[in-house]
Amino acid sequence: MSKVLRLVLGDQLSQSLSSLGDIDRNSDTVLMCEVMGEVTYVRHHKKKVAFILSAMRHFADTLCEEGISVDYVSLDDPENIGNFTGEVARAVTRHDAERLIVTAPGEFRVLEEMQNWETDFGIAVEIRQDDRFLCSPEMFKRWAAGRKQLRMDFFYREMRRHHDVLMVEGKPIGGKWNYDIENRERPDPSRQVPAPLQFLPDETSQTVLELVENYCADHFGELEEFGFAVTRKQALQVLDHFIVNRLPVFGTFQDAMIEGEPWMYHSHIGFYLNVGLLGPGEVITSVQNAYEMGIAPLNSVEGFIRQILGWREFVRGIYWLKMPGYASQNFLAADRPLPDFFWTGDTQMNCLRQSIGQTQKYAYAHHIQRLMVIGNFALLTGLAPKFVNEWYLIVYADAFEWVELPNVSGMVLFADGGYLASKPYAAGGAYINRMSNYCQNCRYRVAEKNGSDACPFNYLYWHFLIKNRDKLGNNARLGMIYRSLDRMSEEKQQTIMDDSRHFLNGLA
Ligand SMILES: Cc1cc2nc3c(=O)[nH]c(=O)nc-3n(C[C@H](O)[C@H](O)[C@H](O)COP(=O)(O)OP(=O)(O)OC[C@H]3O[C@@H](n4cnc5c(N)ncnc54)[C@H](O)[C@@H]3O)c2cc1C
Ligand code: SF4
């Protein structure tokens, strides 16, 4: 009987994983390894490292309870070589393995590494498709073929039809594909935001927290108040808690931000979906059931399902379609290094201080903070895609390259020249003021357009449009804005440029 080694990576913590499908409990071994190379190729947030390692250890325990033999290599094992190739090589020898089976990884970099293994180890290596998604890379490729620009809305409709989600007799429930007209209300600070469901670290998590404190002392972020779910059972509880307590107003307050309320009405399940503790199909079914049982209204349910069935699958499709070239795109030739406050939160711009501060603390910020506060700042100030991508990959516990890169390079930085988004998500301070209460406690004044007290987003917005006119001037969706710019006096435009130059020089 040939001896089979089955490698399970840190974001493959699903019992339905393709590489485990036909496991022979009598002869096969599952290999799981914590390798320093993965912890430090970008120096991930401490809480992110602790979350993944603890979830891995719990998953290994679950497999053992199922009678599966697991060879688990911990980060502090003195023999640990520190990278996948080295650890798999050791395990192949240790188990005298004749075959290696693995599910395709979520990052192109790791796939490239795996593609050398057959030669490296001289054994058969089978890389199986990751079927934990609702659209395979091949299906996405077929959908994208011949389209110059990809639009999520059309993809999402296809996915609704294909998976029969929120459909009745071939038509969208309620008659519309999208209910955003009822969503995205201003925040209501008088409403009590429900506390998120958090878990006290058990013994396994405590051991991991100590390990991370020792091995990642100089990484970004705080370890205190670790409350992530680390098992499937806990992740399911988080999902249920969301459905009952937050989903009913998810759509309404989807874009709202309130000082001191990092979790708002979001689901906080991205972490668990991305490491495999939850699957997208079961999440969509639960949310659809909640609609049918009258727990949540259609505007929230549709808005939420669109994020998972639409955006999540769409960005993954783009990643696998466009890699490796996508990572080096820089359409706007942005080249500024990150300001220090991205690492410290020490800035007088309150919206950024709040968003980065909570990122340090929780390894979490919700979509609008990522997109319209931090991302908007990165876009308007011309921060280099390479550094911005690295930052987002480091700081969020749900960040894996397949989902982080298209969101940052495509959605935030317009670095792909409009392949993912039809126009840059650029905005002045008025947007942040409308969707948050951050401006009330800011040293800058959102109503002022120029001068040392003016909200920097106000002049940086116009500076961005002026500076990138040769690249963006023909964008149909920006036509009206460029016409407003043309109506501005030369003197006003000069003031904008002067204020922006002064601000940007201060960043350096
Ligand atoms: C600059 C930037 C970087 C991002 N980086 C990541 C990342 O590294 N990992 C990640 O999972 N998401 C990323 N997102 C998408 C989104 O912000 C997060 O998925 C979301 O904030 C996670 O929190 P939540 O689970 O509470 O999400 P909710 O707001 O409750 O949404 C539910 C789920 O929908 C999915 N989703 C929503 N929006 C997107 C999107 N744009 N792309 C992919 N999935 C989406 C996620 O799985 C999320 O868990 C990024 C967005 C931006 C603008
Ligand atoms: S005034 Fe400007 S910088 Fe200050 S919180 Fe508002 S948007 Fe942010």
Image: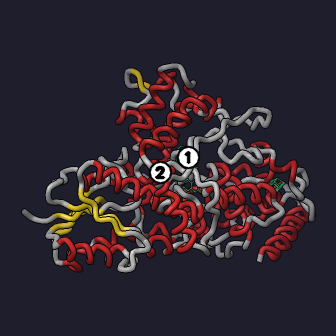
139 vs 339, left or right, is left
In terms of depth relative to the viewer, which is nearer, 205 or 363? Answer: 205
Q: Which residue is mark 2?
A: 230
Does mark 1 have its CB less than 8 Å from ligand 1? no
At x 38%, y 25%, the residue is 170
Task: Locate residue 490: give its quadrant.
Answer: bottom right
Q: What percent of the width, then of the height, locates residue 98? A: 14, 70
Scheme by which the image is coloured: secondary structure
Residue type marked 1? Phe
In terms of depth relative to the viewer, which is nearer, 147 or 286? Answer: 286
The residue most toward the left is: 1
| Above or below for 352 versus 171 | below
Q: Which residue is mark 1?
A: 199
Q: What percent of the width, then of the height, locates residue 65? A: 29, 49
Task: Locate residue 233: give its quadrant.
Answer: top left
The residue most toward the front is: 203
Q: What percent of the width, then of the height, locates residue 375? A: 66, 59
User: Mark 1 or mark 2, which is nearer the start of the sequence?
Assistant: 1
> Callout 2: helix, strand or loop?
loop
At x 66%, y 70%, the residue is 383
79 vs 400, left or right, is left
At x 41%, y 22%, the residue is 168
Q: Are marks 2 and 1 in contact (CB under 8 Å)?
A: yes
Tell me the tag on residue 132.
none
